[in-house]
Image (cartoon, rainbow, N blue to C red):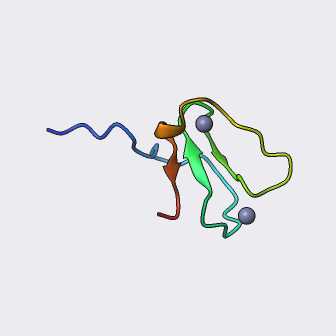
């Protein structure tokens, strides 16, 4: 049985799909982040754990 380290939670937290291609889920924050939207700040320093929602 293989373990996928970066996997989306099931179920996903509710999020607004604004259509941006670069929104992603942050496991550390437990939230979907929207880098293109106003006021975005870096959610954590584990960038390699981010999971793009529109890969
Ligand atoms: Zn957007
Ligand atoms: Zn993060």
25 or 41, nearer to the observer: 41
15 or 6, nearer to the observer: 6
- Expressed as whole percent of the image width and height from the top left, the position of residue 15 reads 66, 54
Vertical comparison of 31 with 23: above or below = above
Vertical comparison of 37 with 5: above or below = below
Q: Quadrant of residue 20?
A: bottom right
The quadrant of the image that shows the N terminus is top left
- Expressed as whole percent of the image width and height from the top left, the position of residue 39 reads 85, 46
Viewed as shown, does residue 36 lie left or right of 1?
Answer: right
Residue at 52% across / 64% down in the picture? 54
The quarter of the image that holds ligand 2 is top right
Count of numbered tags: 0
Viewed as shown, does residue 7 lie left or right of 4?
Answer: right
Residue at 70% across / 37% down in the picture? 42
49 or 14, nearer to the observer: 49
Q: Quadrant of residue 30?
A: top right
- Expressed as whole percent of the image width and height from the top left, the position of residue 28 reads 57, 30
Residue at 67% across / 48% down in the picture? 33
Viewed as shown, does residue 12 lie left or right of 42?
Answer: left
Q: Residue furthest bottom?
A: 19
- Expressed as whole percent of the image width and height from the top left, the position of residue 16 reads 70, 59
Viewed as shown, does residue 44 lie left or right of 37?
Answer: left
Residue at 62% across / 56% down in the picture? 23
């Amino acid at each position: 049985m293989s373990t996928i380290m970066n996997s989306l939670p099931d179920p996903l937290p509710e999020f607004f799909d604004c259509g941006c291609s670069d929104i992603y889920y942050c496991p550390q924050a437990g939230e979907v982040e929207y880098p293109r939207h106003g006021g975005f700040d870096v959610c954590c320093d584990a960038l390699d754990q981010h999971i793009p929602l529109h890969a």
